[in-house]
Amino acid sequence: MKILVTGGAGFIGSHLCERLLLSHHEVTCIDNFSDFYNPIIKERNIISISKFPNFSLQKVDITDYKASESIFMKKNFDLVIHLAAMAGVRPSIENPLYYNEVNVKGTLNLLELCRIFSIKKFIFSSSSSVYGNNKKVPFSEEDSVDFPISPYAMTKKAGELLCHTYHILHDMSIICLRLFTVYGPRQRPDLAIHKFTDLIMNGKEIPLYGKGETERDYTYIDDVIDGFISTIEYIFIGKKFQIFNLGSSNTISLSQMIEVIEKVLKIKAKKLIMSKQPGDVERTYADISKSHKYLNYNPKTAFEEGIIKFIEWKELSKFSNIK
């Protein structure tokens, strides 16, 4: 199968490309290698997969319609998996216009190119952020997501709406996957687990926002990739539009997360108590019953096990000295 993966040099994208290549798919990766974090990290993410003869890398920005169109002209893709995005709640508050440009316009560009080139299968990487401060837990795909509390969450909701529009108008099968705080080897350095691990290892203070009471449904990367692979199988069974949660269906508080990292590192963290940040949700908690029913999704990695694997990667990885 010929598959286009946008954002394929990033944390999740590189793991997905690797799994697809090992399954003998032909994979084209689009990535713009932005300076949101050090581009060298992305380059190293794909060192091993770049050796596959069925892999090609295109340094293209999805906001550039003409450059993106040139990729679609070269190959007749069977499936587009769209992960490329500006991520992060707090940066989106500082730069909402750019988040809209990348996450909304970029998604629209890809859907329109799929329409033009008659590509009928599209998987969109959404986010648990769309649930906002949903009072009902766990979060179900049937819950209202009309109350985002950050520009990032708004752009992901907008992406889902664009996907539904193209499904209705242009006979496309589209699956939106709402990802819940993915972690593991190659995780972005700005994300909490990676950032806090670095700070604790270097004896520096970690910022503890909101007294450490916020809770997240941390999901290990291998389990998320299993969910993507199952989604690929599912999307080729008839025309459909569906939204699925990919989480662990287990909440860990910020304080608990730090305690697990301390335990694995055998180092006590230095904590700096700070006020809660605007845009941060109180809790994320995935109802994965629908994903289990239709995708046979069954996350297997316990949180501490995942942290052990992440820290083993940190200690072995050349990425450790890249900021």
Image (cartoon, rainbow, N blue to C red):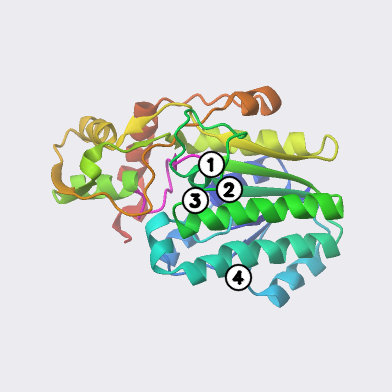
**Is residue 35 visible in this depiction of the protein?**
yes
Q: Mark 4 or mark 2, which has the lower sequence index?
A: 4
Disc 4 versus disc 3: nearer the observer: 3
Query: Residues under labels 2 and 1: Cα distance?
Result: 6 Å
**Residue matched to label 4:** 61
Q: Mark 1 or mark 3, which has the lower sequence index?
A: 3
* Nearer the observer, 66 or 307: 66
Contact between labelled residues 3 and 4, with CB atoms less than 8 Å apart? no
**Residue matched to label 2:** 126
**Residue matched to label 3:** 148
Percent of width and height locating residue 293: 67, 22
Q: Give the range drawn in magenta.
A: 179-191
* Identity, as a three-letter code, of the amino acid under mark 3: Pro
Contact between labelled residues 1 and 2, with CB atoms less than 8 Å apart? yes
* Identity, as a three-letter code, of the amino acid under mark 4: Asp
* Nearer the observer, 190 or 273: 273
Q: Is residue 313 left or right of residue 103?
A: left
Disc 1 versus disc 4: nearer the observer: 1
**Residue matched to label 1:** 179
